[in-house]
Amino acid sequence: MKIRIKALILAMVFVLTFILASCNGMDEGQSQNKKVDDKIKIGLSFDSFIIERWQRDRDVFVSAAKELGAEVNVQNANGVLEEQKNQIKYLIEEKMDVIVIIAIDGFNLSEEVQMAKDKGIKVIAYDRLICNADVDLYISFDNEMVGTLMGQAMVDNGIGGKSVIMLGGSDSDNNVVLVEEGFKKVMRSNNVKILDTMHAAGWKAELAADYIRDNFDTVSRVQGIMCGNDNLASAVVPVLAEKRLAGDIMVVGQDADLEACQRIVEGTQLMTVYKPVERLAQRAAECAVKLAKGEKITSEEGYSSMNDGTYDVPYIALEPLMVTEENMDEVIIASGFHLKEDVYLNVPDKSE
């Protein structure tokens, strides 16, 4: 009888030991899972990668965020608004700490932003403002200054008292409004007449080329063409070349795409606006991590506010730079944005 009692006690001890070991294992596993869950998670929702610069923004942002200990989930909507909305909802379901959005349509994402905020997720509007959404931060370049620099380059080249046309980007992009405001102010103050304006839906460059062909009577009467970005200019200049007007009509753009820089040194594009996207992406990654940690960013350089149509939202604006043939080496080459041999590929005598 005593032997049976001892055996029963030993069996109970064994079972209790097993249970405790299992519980300890679960605690350890739960602790490990918690550590994983505690890692900052950032969702990055892109319009598309049609525009050359977006790939730079992505690479710098992801690298900077990783250095700060965050994981980045990159989504690409390929220019489809409904796809971007679905991807933002997916990022919400994945419990991101912060969602950074390069909006396809800055006027139709306020509902998705509110969904994120309702879940305690911080939202950053990157480069393009999301209107009526009360985002936690809008970070971009001074877009009105971009338009001012475009106009000033034309004025410096003698456009005063003459005529231009404006071939803008998507009218669902709030930046387009700001850039055009800056450009128009310079045109008005220098007695320049804007004969016509068009907007390329979805920033599709072929629409700008079609406009030149379909409205050549108007085009032939102007001395300058303001293109919303360098990608639009890349479609406009070849059509002007077909009409033997490349280099005769001033063409301006923005983003400092490689082909635009090549056209500038070749003489078929007057200028571009260089926006140091590395600085923007780095700063945005830093701000995203700060927001995730609950830290304030009001001490950031360039910090102010901007009205999104309903709310005054925190705003960080970086300064853009004018790039012409005269300062190409100083701004673009010296910064490493493009290599000299690439910029001067078609001008070999200047590539040394």
Image (cartoon, grey):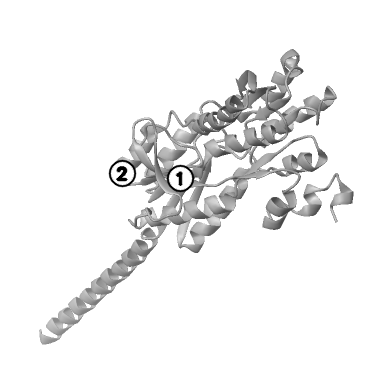
In screen coordinates, is 64 left or right of 108?
A: right
Residue that appears at 42% across and 41% down: 90
| Extreme residue in the bottom direction | 2
**Quadrant the C terminus occupies:** bottom right
* Label 2: which secondary element: loop
* Label 1: which secondary element: strand
Residue that appears at 72% across and 20% down: 222
Q: CA distance from mark 2 to mark 1?
A: 15 Å
**Quadrant the N terminus occupies:** bottom left
Q: Relative to the observer, which residue lies in front, 347 or 73?
A: 347
Tag 2–tag 1 contact (CB < 8 Å): no
Q: Relative to the observer, which residue lies in front, 17 or 326?
A: 326
Estimate the x, y position of residue 8 in percent, counting from the top left: 16, 79
Eyeballing the image, is 271 above or below 213? Answer: below
Residue that appears at 68% across and 40% down: 272
Residue wearing tag 1 = 100
| Extreme residue in the left direction | 1
Estimate the x, y position of residue 204 in percent, counting from the top left: 64, 28
Estimate the x, y position of residue 41 in percent, counting from the top left: 42, 54
